[in-house]
Amino acid sequence: MKRARLAESTRRTVTNEFAPPPNAERALLVAVQWQRDGWDAAASLAELAQLARSAGLEVVGAVTQHLPHPHPRHYVGPGKLAEIVALRQELGFTVVLADDELSPAQLRHLEEKLQLKILDRTALILDIFARRAQTREGRLQVELAQLEYRLPRLTRMWTHLSRQTQGGVGLRGPGETQLEIDRRRARERIALIRRQLDEVRRHRERYRQRRRQRRLPVVSLVGYTNAGKSTLLNALTNASVVVEDRLFATLDPTTRRLLLPDGQVALLTDTVGFIHKLPTSLVAAFRATLEEILEAHLLLHVVDLTHPRAAEQAATVRRVLRELGASQYPTLTVLNKIDLLDPGIDPEQLTRDLDLPEHAVLVSAMTGQGLETLRQRIATMLRDLATIVEVRVHIPYRDMRVLSLLEERATISERRYGSEGILIEARVPRFLVPRLEPYMVR
Ligand SMILES: Nc1nc2c(ncn2[C@@H]2O[C@H](COP(=O)(O)OP(=O)(O)OP(=O)(O)O)[C@@H](O)[C@H]2O)c(=O)[nH]1
Ligand SMILES: [Mg+2]
């Protein structure tokens, strides 16, 4: 019952959302319910609709189907496919949008059967990312992810690289079809972007070293997209990072100084939000951005408490953190948007329903409620993380980053060089322990 009421109060924010542009493409959403990760098709579809609107599409309808797994040829079964064809007259859509990443074969078959533009969740997320990317690194990463996604899906109709195929005379190998040329161009472009990204990242590594030298503790905001991370960064640091009721408003990392009540100064960083079914090509391309999280001493996991799927969203975030190797990091959960809760709802009860693994602070980044408590908690945790502990670690030579981290931050009492790595005994601040965890010798 609480959830129902909550869903209503959340809906209020959803209706605030911007209207589609006047000549927006009309999209039909299609979802197969098959995954067992706590997300049902309805929730996943609601999110897909929000993604579609964020990408500028108008959603005109949705169909779902329960299947053990998506149909290998056309995602939905043949009966459902016929239903979609029939719906076309009535709803007048020009785009069909699938809630899972379609295989190249599924995409091709659906295009043939429906003679419509077919998009999937991944293409949509990539499109939103492409519009939002601001920095050079962000843009390169998105383009890389897009090319990786498109390469196996290239068909003769594919024209995205046609600009670059002009003047191809002489470059064209004998008997090479347009499709082969397109593929080769895409691969060349991928290689070029990789080289450019390497360069950008070398720059960033230098910046990171400078930041470490300043010796300020780093607190990273993590969380589901639209949870309120940027709003919280602004509220805590008087910054003016873009805040929007859209998915993926922030793509590029931003860092601000955070002044704490006990006089400590920390760096607070905000970055890209996570989402259910985050495309693998994006995770790979954004790996460097996401790995910034590994530089953090403390994570603030921001959760939109008023979202009907808050628990699933929080679980998704924890899963991504685990994949990144940050699951052992000290984390403070920040339950946000409490100003939106109906007066009848007890936030403490709601918190218990979420079944959180760690302590949580209730706040409203919008009204400022709870922020003083949050600042105190951050200060206490950072003080605790600065205490010194003794460790014995075996650092492999391949992980130079951890080695340089130790050189910078630890007092090393003993080193023994082996064939694979160095055995080190050192006194380190506690915040380094999760980072050293994989190499700990007991
Ligand atoms: N009512 C209310 N709205 C909030 C609060 N915090 C954030 N919002 C709204 O939630 C929406 C998303 O906020 P952002 O700060 O952009 O969220 P984010 O986590 O940075 O999102 P991404 O950058 O897309 O990952 C915006 O419309 C904010 O105004 C809050 O405490 N109360
Ligand atoms: Mg943001």
Image (cartoon, rainbow, N blue to C red):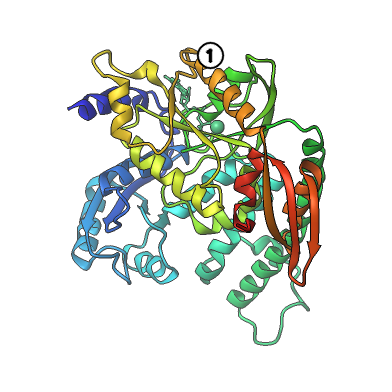
**Nearer to me, 62 or 47:** 47
Query: Residue 279 location, x and y as percent?
Result: 49, 55
Say which residue label 1 marks: 372
Residue at coordinates 79% horizontally, 48% vertically from top-left? 412
If the picture is divided into quarters, which one holds ligand 2?
top right
**Nearer to me, 219 or 235:** 219
At numbered mark 1, what does the secondary structure look like: helix, strand or loop? helix
Residue at coordinates 28% horizontally, 65% vertically from top-left? 69
Q: Is residue 80 above or below residue 202?
A: below
Position of the C terminus, as image quadrant, is bottom right
* Label 1 environment density (alpha carbons within 10 Å; few <14, some 14–19, many ≥20): some
Position of the N terminus, as image quadrant, is top left
**Going by the picture, which residue comes out furthest to the bottom?**
174
Quarter of image, res 336: top left
Quarter of image, res 259: top right
Query: Residue 387 location, x and y as percent?
Result: 66, 33
Query: Residue 374 location, x and y as percent?
Result: 52, 20
Is 275 on the left or on the right of 91, as rendered?
right
Query: Residue 280 location, x and y as percent?
Result: 51, 58
**Nearer to me, 40 or 248:** 40
Q: Is residue 305 above or below residue 81?
A: above
Is 3 on the left or on the right of 55, as rendered?
left
Residue at coordinates 58% horizontally, 75% vertically from top-left? 179
Residue at coordinates 44% horizontally, 69% vertically from top-left? 104
The amino acid type found where label 1 is placed reads Glu
